[in-house]
Structure formats: C-alpha cells, structure tokens
Image: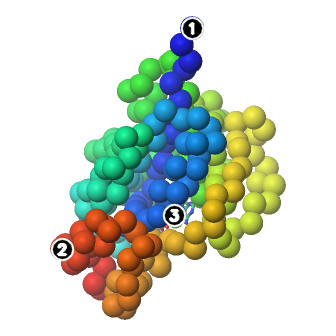
Amino acid sequence: MTQKRRLGIMGGTFDPIHHGHLVAASEVAHAFDLDEVVFVPTGLSSHKEGQDITPAEDRYLMAVIATASNPRFSVSRIDIERPGPTYTVDTLRDMRKLHGPDCELFFITGADALEKMLDWHDTAELFEQAHFVGVTRPGHRLTDPGLPGGRVSLMEVPALAISSTECRDRVRDGEPIWYLVPDGIVQYINKRALYRG
Ligand code: ATP
Ligand code: MG
C-alpha cells in the first residue's frame, strides 16, 4: 500500500517573501514528513483589506524566485486567480479538488494568524479539509488557543524576527534587507523599485 501524499500549504501575502516563511516551511516539511510544500500567495487578502498591497504578479514572482532552488517547494496561482478576497476555506477546497481525496493537506500558518482562526469563515470545514500547523514566531507566545484537538499542531521554529512589514520599512528607509530575504528577492525589489513609498 502506498502512503498518502502529504502536501503542505503555506498561504500568505508574501509582500515580500522572506527567510521566516522559508524556514517555517522547511521545518514543518521535515517534522511532518511532507512530500511538498506549496506556497500560495493571496489575492486580495481578506485580512489586509484597505492596505496598500503590492500587485499579485510581483508577489507571485518573488515566491517563485525564493522557492526555485528547493525541489520540494512550489508556488500556486489558485488564490490570485480567484476573484475577490482570499479565504482559506476556498484555498483548501481548490487544493483538495486539484490533488484528490488521497492526499493529506497540512496548512502551515504563523501563531498570530492561528489565533485569529476562530474568527475565520467555516471553521468546521477548515478542520475537516486539513491538519493545521501553527508555528511560533518571535513576539507571539502560544497560549491555549482553544482549537479542536487532533487537527491542530503547534510547533516551534528557530526564532526569526523577520516580517514582511519590517522588510518593507527597511527598503523605504534605505536600510539593507540582505540576508533577511533571499538574494534574488533583494535584486527583484531593486529592479522593480518596490516599497520605495
Ligand atoms: P506582514 O508583516 O505584512 O504581516 P508577514 O511577515 O507576517 O507579513 P505574511 O505573508 O503575512 O508575512 O505571512 C504568511 C504566513 O507566514 C503567516 O501564517 C505568518 O504568520 C507566517 N510568518 C510570517 N513571518 C514568519 C516568521 N518570521 N516565522 C514563522 N512564520 C512566519
Ligand atoms: Mg502577517
């Protein structure tokens, strides 16, 4: 009998993608024996509406550049091609349709996002569709989030105090982002003059 395919899904705005995202995905892939992690940049983010977000095409290309060297990482356009704001329940439905019933889905998310999860749409369906892995990041202590047992795991990843907000602020202020993001992302941001304000 063949083992079910184990597929990680890392959703995010990725504005820009940084080493915090990549380390989290790599750590979860190792700990949960995942065959692949798919990075899924959001369309219009339901959580970030009204904010000034970089065009989806730039965020998508940066995700491709950052993941290109890892054979187990890939990037999906499903959220940016679905009209309207991105809801995780739609992401999981589409991934399920694409990959079939014989696939285990693991949704990887930061502890901050996990805490907000009970406010999300269709929570019951979310937990039916996927196992959720909440990773700690600096400044977010994992308290008991009151989430259903068995479908949610919490995992500590090496503390990386990197956020996209910090990267954008640094570029705007003329500070370096070398080594916070992959080299190709530094170059892409320069080439496209992103985050200059
Ligand atoms: P912003 O500062 O704009 O909110 P962000 O750095 O949080 O950006 P997102 O694209 O919002 O990046 O994050 C996508 C997912 O990655 C979320 O689940 C988030 O919690 C998680 N994440 C972000 N930064 C880290 C990090 N340094 N370590 C682990 N997980 C992270
Ligand atoms: Mg965030």
In the rendered structure, the answer to whether residue 5 lies left or right of residue 141 reads left
The dot on residue 191 is 2
Q: How far is the residue under mark 1 from the one under mark 3? A: 36 Å
Report the residue marked by disc 1. Answer: 1
Q: Are marks 2 and 1 in contact (CB under 8 Å)?
A: no
Report the residue marked by disc 3. Answer: 20
Q: Quadrant of the N terminus?
A: top right
Task: Work out whether 32 lies above or below 99.
Answer: below
Camera-side residue of 78 and 187: 187
Name the residue at 40% across, 63% down.
17
- Asked whether residue 60 is in view, the answer is no
Name the residue at 53% across, 30% down.
6
| Disc 2 packing (10 Å; few <14; some 14–19; many ≥20) | few
- Asked whether residue 157 is in view, the answer is yes
Residue 59 in percent (x, y) is at 31, 60
Q: Which one is closest to the eye, mark 2 or mark 1?
A: 1
Asked whether mark 3 lies closer than 8 Å to ligand 1, one says yes
Which residue occupies the extreme top position in the image? 1
Kind of element beneath mark 3: helix
Q: Earlier in the sequence, mark 1 or mark 3?
A: 1
| Disc 1 packing (10 Å; few <14; some 14–19; many ≥20) | few
Kind of element beneath mark 2: helix
In the rendered structure, the answer to whether residue 192 lies left or right of residue 82 reads left
Residue 139 in percent (x, y) is at 68, 73
Q: Amino acid at mark 3?
A: Gly
